[in-house]
Amino acid sequence: MTRVSVLLDAPRAPRPFAGTAAAAALLALASGCTAGNVFTSSGSGGHASGGDAAGAAPAGRTGADAPDDAAPSPDAPPMPLADAPSEPAPAAGGACAGLFCEDFEQGMLDTATWSVQMGGAGTVAVQQDIVAHGKFAYRVHGSGASGDFAMIITRNAPAALRGAGPVYGRAYVYAAANLKSHIELGFAGSTRDPAQPPLINKGMNFNYMEFAEFAGSWQLGFDLFDPAPGVARGFVEEASYPPAHDKVPAGTWSCIEWEFGDDPTMMVLWVDGKQLDQFDVQHIDFSSTGRTAGSVLNGKSAGIVGGFAFFGFGFHSYGGSAAVDRYFDDIVLDTKRVGCLPEKPAGG
């Protein structure tokens, strides 16, 4: 197996989310999982390997390439959120807590697990200076120019994570500074043509859900670059935002958790165990196109991104900002909520 180290140049009524028959089937599959079909790219002890490794718009927001420095209205009332599921018990003894794990403890990126995509001044590195746990963590850096990106994308995600979900994730994320731009941090998506790999560029060929930073706070949303059937060609975006006072912490590690589902289309975001945001037909703060009441997009409430075939982590800058430095550690993907580790790591 070839491994490579990529180095850096020096109020609304809350509603609970209900599962679907497909989700129940995935959960049943997950509950029957053994160590033989848990995937991890880490070389640290206790990890098993195997299996199938991979609406009003804020002012000035007009699309993916527009500067995203306009905050949601400060006059909007706080949005009550759905009750979070009970906190799951984290895995003990360094074992993988889900179907897919990456803790970067190999000290390099495994090219059988990840494809690396960089654009503009974006760079990636596995480094030892700022880590959440263990000895290594993943860093992405950009100049702050609009369009910069640096992402690692799963090559062959486990089969149980593919499809309409729901899928859950957990990553420890460190922001060197709180920025006012729109910075994508993680996504899950698919291409309409499964034979085509995802390509991050001005003419992206895939649809995805993301958790991101926006206007110094957070964002959940989807972007369609290869639109769903019945949706006119062209870029489509919809998003939700938590209250503006929920700022992205800077200079410390945060436990970020998310739930993505495409049947129905919905998203949830937790930060350090607290639910901050959700996206569904009742919670949409921005839409780049028309949608009907009770729908996510043009009368649709499911199948918007075409399910999930791959997952990405890093950054993509939509709008100019100061230099971007983000760090990731202890990434886990599963068909149930993962939860944070027992103790929050120290700052840098």
Image (cartoon, rainbow, N blue to C red):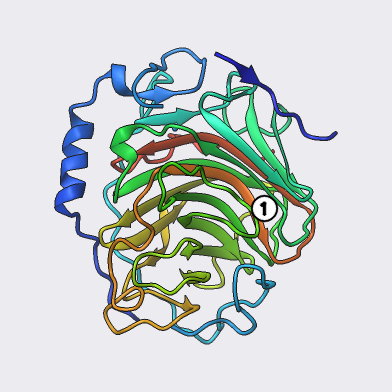
Residues 321 and 77: in front is: 321
Q: Amino acid at mark 1?
A: Ala
45 in relation to 97, above or below: above
Identify the image quadrant of residue 320.
bottom right
Query: Which quadrant does the N terminus fall into?
Result: top right
Image point 62% across, 36% down: which residue?
A: 116
- Residue 68 x, y percent position in the rendering: 65, 71
Instruction: Please name whichever residue, 245 or 127, is drawn nearer the observer in this view of the structure.
Output: 127
Q: Residue at x 83, y 35 (%)?
A: 9
Q: Quadrant of residue 99?
A: top left
Q: Residues within 10 Å of mark 1 (few under 14, many from 20)?
A: some
The residue drawn where x is 32% and y is 76% is 282
- Residue 155, position in %: x, y? 48, 33
Task: Tell me the SS state at disc 1.
Answer: loop
Q: Is residue 98 visible?
A: no
Q: Is residue 332 visible?
A: yes
> Residue sitting at 52 percent across and 71 percent down?
234
Q: Which quadrant of the view contains residue 94?
A: top left
Identify residue for label 1: 250
The image shows residue 128, relative to residue 50, as above or below, that is below
In x, y percent, where is residue 251? 69, 48
